[in-house]
Image: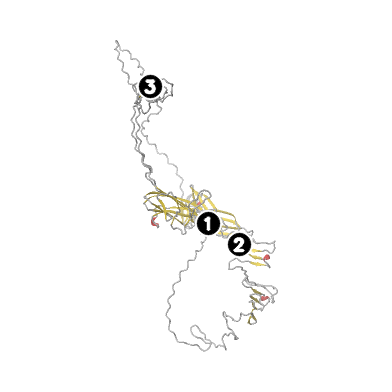
Amino acid sequence: MTTKRPLANYTGSIQEIQSGDQIPASVVPNGLPTGGTTGQYLYKQSNTDYDVAFGAGPLGPTGATGPTGLTGATGPTGATGPTGVGATGATGPIGPTGVTGVTGPIGATGPVGATGPTGAGGAYGYWGSFYDTTNQTASVINTAYAVSLNGTDPNSNGVSIVSGNRITFANDGVYTLNVSLMFVNTDTQIHNGIMWFRKNDSGATGDIPDSSSDVSVPNSHGGVNGFIIVTVPLTLKILAGDYIQVMWAVDDTHVGLLTVAPAVGPVAPCALVSVQQVLYTQLGPTGATGPTGLTGPTGPTGVTGPTGAASTVPGPTGATGPTGLTGATGPTGATGVAGNTVLNGTVAPTAGIGVNGDFYINTTTEYIYGPKAAGAWPAGVPLIGPTGPTGLTGATGLTGPTGPTGLTGPTGATGPTVYPATGLAVSTGTAWGTSKTAPTGDVVGTSDSQTLTNKTLTNPTIDGFTGDTSVINIGAGQIYKDATGNVGFGTTTPNYKNQVKIATNKNSAIGASVKGPSGISLAGVNDANTQNIPLELRAATLRLTANNTDSSGGTITFGNDASDWAHFDSSGNLILDKSSSINLNTLSLAYSPIYGNYGYQKLPSGVIIQWGITAFTTGTGIATITFPVAFPTNISGIAACVYRGFVLGGYLMSTQIQNTSKTGFSILGNYTTGGSVVLLSANEGASWIVTGW
């Protein structure tokens, strides 16, 4: 650009440039339009470059501030004036600092380095997601079961389920498994569940060490089953073809794995398993850094700022002085309070043993005394509770198999035939006795009449007593059977299957009738069986029992008809319904001994009071109570408290009534110490009383 022309002589397209820039012809075409504003413009000089023109056109917007120019060169030092004559004068004042020269322009910025190549993409890891929507149960306690998985995310990659429970891997790598199981407990007692991992084996030898998790599953309460979710992670190295099984077991068959369909939200499977490969480099490598551009020239040094205010920071600390002399030893402090302890012996403690605040255990009686106060020991408290009720008798074991039959001995030789004497032979068991001479004809003929004198008949069968009517004469009495099958003893007109008639006098005042399968009737009747007569029962002890066995359960009634009978009911209560004004059907005098760990009392009003002392179960903190007798209708109130044990010594106690019914209930007991809740054990017991009707 060698020629600069005034803007007035130029019409054409305008383009802002930096002074000194060379613009190729391809940037601005030949046909440049008119226009322009004050500033730097270019117009065409030739086909290869353009000149810069400065004009005074309309004022345009303020451009961006240009870069600071280079510092100008220092001007030349003026010539030294001639030396004056005479004494040297006083030094003149220092002249003002000269004006800083104009800053020169900053050099052009170097080109930006080329962008490095894009790094490679991260690796795509293998993964799988599985679940099970069934309910899984354990038929045998303390037995390993593999968790079934019946569902798979269709997008799973490289991990699958084989044989319903094997999490199988198609590729080598390090993988993390996250497993969640939902345990359920339908029992009223707390039970335990356990889960662990097994690799490439159907037996215990494949169990992965240190992979077990044990959990206590809450008991059911308020009609709701107990639930708990167990979540366990596992990271391990896998080879292609390996498989992992999630194993589980329980200590009671009331515990299982449950799938829940809640009222809101999706189904909650009983088992969830997610598998993800651990990747060492999930992001691609960073691209190479481009080259650094050229450094521009250093700008001029700015004007020195004014001197700052005086420092307010303290100076450094001086060196530490020498250590002073050691002071005299102070006086000895007062003697501290003596500590307390727990003493023991084989007899009860005496006043001379121990100090105030001590405890003492009698190892013979297992009683604890203390704390000692005012020089005296309080009464001892038993450490061992009363013996609990005897458990139920176990079921009878199975009968062993019958042993084999012994071998048959050899047949002995046939002995000689020996005949007894003439007549009816009688054997003594070891020999033939004296024969009896038979009467004329058959010994027992089908038509002969035989007279048996002083003979004993054992279980005889009497033929001929099957016709329409039959009679057996026995002395002055007879046994008579009529055509309908009624049999009379002492009467020829029986009205029942078995009817006994006895002479109607005061000493044998029974005219009796004995009925068949529908029941037995004992009645006082006249000889013609047309009128009832008084019936008197006499005995040293008279017992009326109405039941199928010797246990209670029948009804004894008194009266003419069902609506007018007074009776004992099946529970032994006396019911008097003779008239509407007398109704004692709630009268009960039942009771149990009022001592020991359990007892009850039934009041005339029908109210039943029951009480007892029951030990807690170690590990669960639950005392399970079965009432001595069941309440027929309902429970009206329960009161319970902890009555013995070391927890009486200043701890915060808590008892909770659970699982109430007409046959029993349970108590959950605990105490708080040091901010922790501790379940009560067999060393503690619950004292309770219940009312109902």
Label 2 CA crowd tier, 10 Å (few <14, some 14–19, many 20+): some
Of the pair 396 and 109, the residue shown nearer to us: 109
In which quarter of the view is residue 580 placed? bottom right
Question: Which label's residue is closer to the chain start, 1 or 2?
Answer: 2
Viewer-nearest of labels 1 and 2?
1
Q: In front: 644, or 90?
A: 90
| Quadrant assignment for the C terminus | bottom right
Question: Which residue bears the numbered disc 1?
Answer: 624
Reading the image, the residue beneath label 3 is 53
Instruction: Determine contact: label 1, label 2, CB under 8 Å.
Output: no
For the residues bearing labels 3 and 1, Cβ distance under 8 angstroms: no
Task: State whether residue 510 is above or below residue 392.
Answer: below
Residue labelled with disc 2: 590
Ranked by sequence position, the earlier of labels 3 and 2 is 3
Estimate how packed mark 3 is, as few (under 14), some (14 to 19) or many (20 or more) residues with alpha carbons within 10 Å. some
| Residue 315 position within the rendered picture, expressed as x and y whole percent measured from the top left | 38, 29
CA distance separating discs 3 and 2:
131 Å
At label 3, the amino acid type is: Ala
683 sits to left or right of 521: left
